[in-house]
């Protein structure tokens, strides 16, 4: 006889083998898992997962037992009445694989009754002439029943293990998202994504604020009215659950749970239930409780991080204010004293000076006034950067005009020094805020003039490199020490060299802020021939 391979299509698929396909869902009532398995083996294993269907499989089980009874009438003369018990035992095991405990018992009892009534002499009677028929009947059905019950138990334990595996995977995914969230809005996005996906329910998230309880997220299908708002506010005040299925606000359609930490209630999450019969199962409620604990800790952590950031900003603001005052007291005094001294000399003793001397005094006063103007401009620019008031207005600009405007703004110091300007002939118009980039070139050129000898030239070069405008300003001074290159763009950083010119240490920091606002890059390098080169690049096309 050739072996026959029987194929059965099992109803009800449940998640399995999370190491192959990590699941992020836990079935809720009325929401069967619909995610397809990732492999044929996984689908077969899923079909073997038992689902306790109550009495829904009873008609099919009785029909199977009845079919065996009918077929047994034909084959009894061939295989004998006692061997038909094996077929009935297979029917009991088959019922265990398909329909659970209740149907197994019904199948076993009906099989025993039909086997005794139709196939044990005397026929059509429940009284057996031969005791061994009765022993065989009871033994076969008992073995079938025990095997079926053990099979159901093993399958249910495997199903529970897979469900716990799925819950663990969902919790792991949620906690990973929370761990990656550093801001409150990111924490809320993680809650809004994972909780509805895991529990298949609409949710609402409310957090206390200066104006009371505020809805920070609400699923589109969820209706949140004044009655629901009162229920949520009661949860914040008492730290207890309320809403659908509880004694407090039982008329609500939402079940509210507090987000509690050591600091108290930091928020409320509502799960749509509509009716007490539609509440989550006990296992799901336990998982939801773990979700809420993790969410509460994440909200607290984000709140503490925001407070720490504000404290840091206050500290930086205080540092800026102290530096500004220090800069005003030290760096403004010298040019003001020079200007006042010149004006006093001209007013009191002007008749004693000849024309060249008066001209020299006026040029000195002008230079000091320009230094004072640049210093004040840097202070104002740094205040704008710190306050986020820099708004880039990009317009197509000619690089020739930008460099010319920067040198014109520097004035006499630029005219007294040899400055080499090299501009590539094929440069297109570059989108930029001309006022800001002119200020960048003014600061870079002014630094090059201050930190190099009077008889050495300054080099300014502009060219195109990889779809970007690249501008470099180089001098032939002592050069920035190698260990200071990484810090020259920090606020208030100045070289420790004793012969370095005095300054507030804001020029390069302002340059970096303006270039960053253009989506550009700026860097400093030591020249092989001596001196420093500071370069920046801007995109030739603005992404929209």
Image: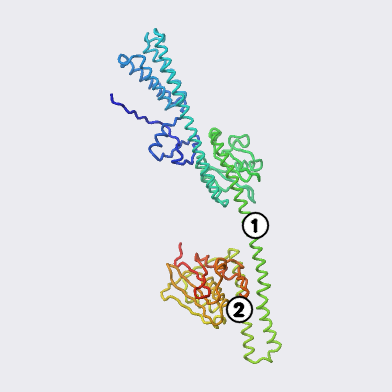
Of the numbered discs 2 and 1, the one sitting upstream in the chain is 1
Please count the marks in the image: 2
Q: Where does the image place residue 470, in percent across and percent down from the top left?
A: 47, 70
Residue that carries the numbered disc 2 in the rendered image: 370
- Cα–Cα gap, marks 2 and 1: 37 Å
Q: Nearer the viewer, residue 442 or 223?
A: 442
Res. 334 image quadrant:
bottom right
Residue 108 placed where, x, y %? Answer: 43, 19
In which image quadrant can residue 342 be found?
bottom right
Residue sitting nearer the eye, 196 or 514:
514
Task: State left or right for residue 86 relative to residue 364.
Answer: left
Question: Helix, strand or loop at disc 1?
Answer: helix
| Residue 313 against residue 102 in the figure, above or below | below
Tag 2 secondary structure? helix
Residue furthest out toward the right: 348
Q: Is residue 185 above or below residue 292?
A: below
Q: Are marks 2 and 1 in contact (CB under 8 Å)?
A: no
Residue 528's place in the image compared with 152, above or below, is below
Residue at x 51%, y 38% (from the top left corner): 167
Rendered location of residue 423, percent (x, y): 45, 76
How many residues crowd mark 1 within 10 Å: few (<14), some (14–19), many (20+)?
A: few
Q: Is residue 82 left or right of residue 279?
A: left
| Residue 421 percent across, percent down from the top left | 48, 78
- Does 374 sit left or right of 24 as displayed? right
Q: Quadrant of the N terminus?
A: top left
The residue at 52%/78% (across/down) is 458
- Which residue lies at the image location 59% right of the left edge and 48% below the top edge? 299
* In the foreground, 444 or 95: 444
Q: How is the image coloured?
A: rainbow
Mark 2 neighbour class, 10 Å CA radius: few under 14, some 14 to 19, many 20 or more: some
The circle drawn on residue 311 is: 1
């Amino acid at each position: 006889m050739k072996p026959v391979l029987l194929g059965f299509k099992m109803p009800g698929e449940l998640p399995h083998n999370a190491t192959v396909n990590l699941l992020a869902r836990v079935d809720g009532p009325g929401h069967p898992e619909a995610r397809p398995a990732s492999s044929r083996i996984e689908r077969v294993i899923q079909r073997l997962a038992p689902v306790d269907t109550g009495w829904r499989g009873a008609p099919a089980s009785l029909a199977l037992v009845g079919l065996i009874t009918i077929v047994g009438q034909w084959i009894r003369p061939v295989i004998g009445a006692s061997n038909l018990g094996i077929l009935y035992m297979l029917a009991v095991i088959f019922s265990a694989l398909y329909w659970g405990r209740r149907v197994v018992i019904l199948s076993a009892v009906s099989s025993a009754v039909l086997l005794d009534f139709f196939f044990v002499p005397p026929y059509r009677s429940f009284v057996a002439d031969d005791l061994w028929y009765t022993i065989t009947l009871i033994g076969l059905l008992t073995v079938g029943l025990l095997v079926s019950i053990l099979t159901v138990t093993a399958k249910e334990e495997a199903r529970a293990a897979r469900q716990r595996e799925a819950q663990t995977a969902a919790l792991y995914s949620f906690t990973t998202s929370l761990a990656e969230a550093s801001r409150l809005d990111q924490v809320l996005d993680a809650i809004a994504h994972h909780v509805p996906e895991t529990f298949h329910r609409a949710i609402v998230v409310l957090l206390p604020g200066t104006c009371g309880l505020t809805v920070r997220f609400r699923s589109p299908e969820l209706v949140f009215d004044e009655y629901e708002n009162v229920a949520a506010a009661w949860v914040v005040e008492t730290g207890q659950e309320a809403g659908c299925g509880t004694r407090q606000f039982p008329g609500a359609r939402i079940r509210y749970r507090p987000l509690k930490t050591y600091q108290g209630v930091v928020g409320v999450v509502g799960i749509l239930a509509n009716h007490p019969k539609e509440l989550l199962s006990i296992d799901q409620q336990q998982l939801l409780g773990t979700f809420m604990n993790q969410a509460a800790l994440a909200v607290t952590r984000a709140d503490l991080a925001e407070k720490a950031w504000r404290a840091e900003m206050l500290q930086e603001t205080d540092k800026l204010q102290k530096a500004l005052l220090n800069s005003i007291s030290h760096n403004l005094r010298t040019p003001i004293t020079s200007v006042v001294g010149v004006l006093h000399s001209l007013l009191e003793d002007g008749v004693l000076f000849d024309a060249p001397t008066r001209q020299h005094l006026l040029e000195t006063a002008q230079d000091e006034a320009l230094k004072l103007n640049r210093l004040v401009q840097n202070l104002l620019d740094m205040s704008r950067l710190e306050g986020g008031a820099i708004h880039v207005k990009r317009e197509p600009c000619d690089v020739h005009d930008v460099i010319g405007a920067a040198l014109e703004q520097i004035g006499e110091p630029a005219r007294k020094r040899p400055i080499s300007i090299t501009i590539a002939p094929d440069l297109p118009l570059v989108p930029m805020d001309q006022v800001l980039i002119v200020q960048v070139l003014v600061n870079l050129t002014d630094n090059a003039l201050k930190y190099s000898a009077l008889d050495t030239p300054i080099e300014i070069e502009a060219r195109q490199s990889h779809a970007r405008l690249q501008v470099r300003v180089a001098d032939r001074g002592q050069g920035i020490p190698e260990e200071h290159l990484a810090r020259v763009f920090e606020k208030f950083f100045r070289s420790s060299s004793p012969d370095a010119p005095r300054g507030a240490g804001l020029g390069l920091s302002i340059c970096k802020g303006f270039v960053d606002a253009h989506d550009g890059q700026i860097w400093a390098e030591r020249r092989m021939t001596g001196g420093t080169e500071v370069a920046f690049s801007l995109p030739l096309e603005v992404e929209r």
